[in-house]
Amino acid sequence: MSHDLPKPAASLRGPVVFINLWAQSGMKHYSESLMHALAPAVEVFYLRNYESCLEVPGRQVRLHPVGLRGCTELVVVAREILRRRPAAIHLNSELPILLPLFPLFACFNSVITLHDAVPHEGESFAKRAFMRLHLLLVFLFIRKVIVHSVAIRDELPAFLRSRTHVLPHVNYSLWAHEKSSPRDAAPPGDVAPPHDGSLQGKRFVVLFFGRLLSYKGLEYLLEAFRQLDRQRFELIIAGEGDLSDYRIEGANIRTLNRFIPDEEMAALFNEAHVVALPYLSASQSGVAYMAFAFEKPVIATRVGALADVVIDGQNGFLIEPRSAEALAAALTRIADPGTWSRLAENVRRQNFSADEDIRTRLLEIYGG
């Protein structure tokens, strides 16, 4: 994907060096989308450990975010920064391997995006301890913090809030260039789609997408499906993780219990009518933004910042967490053809985090 790059923003004297070492799933989607938004208006240099889909200046390094593999490449990162004298260094999320470079980052206009302020339910003791240590190191060495909701900012330690900026989440339109309506996708099973494009004659497909972690409330979605008509509803569970503790039954539930590569993701979102986020706790969810990029309504629980994204009755429905009955009722309601069509049309019309808005706000944060 190419860009006709305009003249770099005059307010920044030097490039923005953006660093992401999470090579898969949400963090990669986020980083590529942010660079897609930023690159047309400012000089960027993109440091990552994967092949980018963008034609922007950068370098691929052999660094693992949490392991020692390729740690000698830290010298390469340091040299690139010192050579370019950037106007801003922007880190995407926690990158443990980069901690030795934090004193160097302190010498520059350093920025970090924190996607979570507190550990998720079920996280290991080691992860919880690291997050606390990381927040202290951010306070000591990083000048600015970006979060994507007021709720996340308010969960941060008081000593970080004064340097924290709330930025709208990037949109994921970059990943949805092959989007289609469920009526255009291959229908589930052998049921042919109706000629009028309605929901009659085919199952209503619900997608649960992403890593299988306890805080995501999959057990309540499965319980809700036991209350629904198996001939009318279908559930797709797509993501890696342990399914052994879940009671999965019925021919209307499909599982893809593995990492889902980008080339398969579009087909899953296209097949779905709605995306379900029955989370027990959350700060935010990139899956919701991906759903909207594919023009799919979302059913989510009222936890964390999800209510800032899913507007009840407009682009989906909000329910209370830990209630299979409420989830089943919401699925039944949204499967009504008129209701689903209205919500899907609202999603198509909404303008979530336009690239221009993200770009403008980022430049204000970098330059402030």
Image: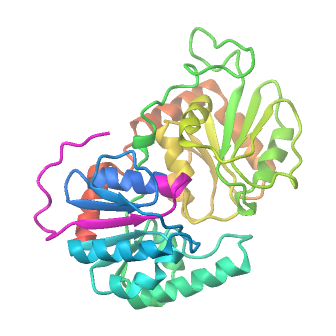
Query: Which residue is rendered at x = 25% and y = 78% of the image?
Result: 82
Query: Which residue is rendered at x = 56% and y = 70% of the image?
Result: 69
Q: Which residues are magenta?
A: 1-28
Query: Which residue is rendered at x = 68% and y = 12% of the image?
Result: 192
Left or right? Give the position of 217 relative to 84. Answer: right
Is residue 63 placed above or below 175 in the rendered structure?
Answer: below
Where does the image place residue 14, in percent across and percent down from the top left? 17, 69
Is residue 166 placed above or below 49 in the rendered structure?
Answer: below
The image quadrant of residue 255 is top right
- Does the magenta portion include 317? no
Left or right? Give the position of 113 relative to 249. Answer: left
| Foreground pick, 33 / 101 | 101
- Outermost top residue: 195
Query: Which residue is rendered at x = 13% and y = 71% of the image?
Result: 13
| Foreground pick, 16 / 71 | 71
Where does the image place residue 281, in percent across and percent down from the top left? 67, 65
